[in-house]
Amino acid sequence: MEIAKNYRINSLFEFYEPLLTNKQKEYIQLYYADDYSLGEIAEEFSVSRQAVYDNIKRTEKILEGYETKLHLYHDFVERNQEIDAISDYVKGHYHGDTQLIKMIQQLVNLEADSE
């Protein structure tokens, strides 16, 4: 399994999990987060490997569809990049201003807590 795809699906799952059915949640969790094989999931739920595969592929499309419409993951990544850039700038230009660096770190922590 491709690492970048695995990371993306896990990230999308974090944002959009409440919008999925219980079965979709369970299959995605087992396949992407817990690294179960299709066969292991099929055995766990007493269904065919093809049924598991179809459900996972359909759920991936659903997650990508939510992201296309809502952009929650994209916006999260952009905000984090902006925060990192500001933090790097402050560290590079305001060496002695630990107060300012602490304020940025608090903003980052507030951002993380709100999600």
Image (cartoon, grey):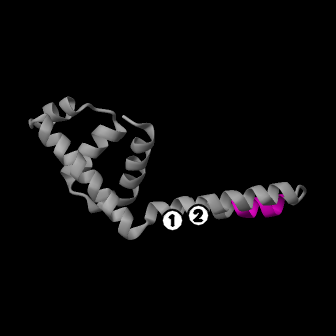
Image position, residue 86 (x, y; %) = 73, 62
Amino acid beneath label 1 = Asp
Image position, residue 72 (x, y; %) = 44, 65
Where residue 19 sits, quadrant-wise, is bottom left
4 to 80, vertically: above or below: above
Name the chief secondary structure element in magenta.
Answer: helix
Instruction: Indicate whether residue 99 is drawn in magenta.
Output: yes
Instruction: Indicate whether residue 100 is drawn in magenta.
Output: yes
**Split into 4 quadrants, where in the image is the N terminus?**
top left
- Left or right: where 58 falls relative to 112: left
Disc 2 crowd, CA 10 A, few/some/many (<14, 14-19, 20+): some
Q: Are marks 2 and 1 in contact (CB under 8 Å)?
A: yes
Where residue 106 sits, quadrant-wise, is bottom right
Mark 2 = which residue?
79
Rendered residue at 27%/58% (across/down): 62
101 to 25, vertically: above or below: below
- Left or right: where 74 falls relative to 28: right
Rendered residue at 17%/41% (across/down): 52
Image position, residue 101 (x, y; %) = 78, 59
Mark number for residue 75? 1
Amino acid beneath label 2 = Arg
Disc 1 crowd, CA 10 A, few/some/many (<14, 14-19, 20+): few
Where residue 63 sits, quadrant-wise, is bottom left
Rendered residue at 54%/58% (across/down): 77
- Left or right: where 30 falls relative to 89: left
Q: Which residues are magenta?
A: 98-105
Q: Secondary structure at mark 2?
A: helix
Q: Secondary structure at mark 1?
A: helix
- Left or right: where 97 falls relative to 105: right
Counting every numbered tag in the picture gives 2
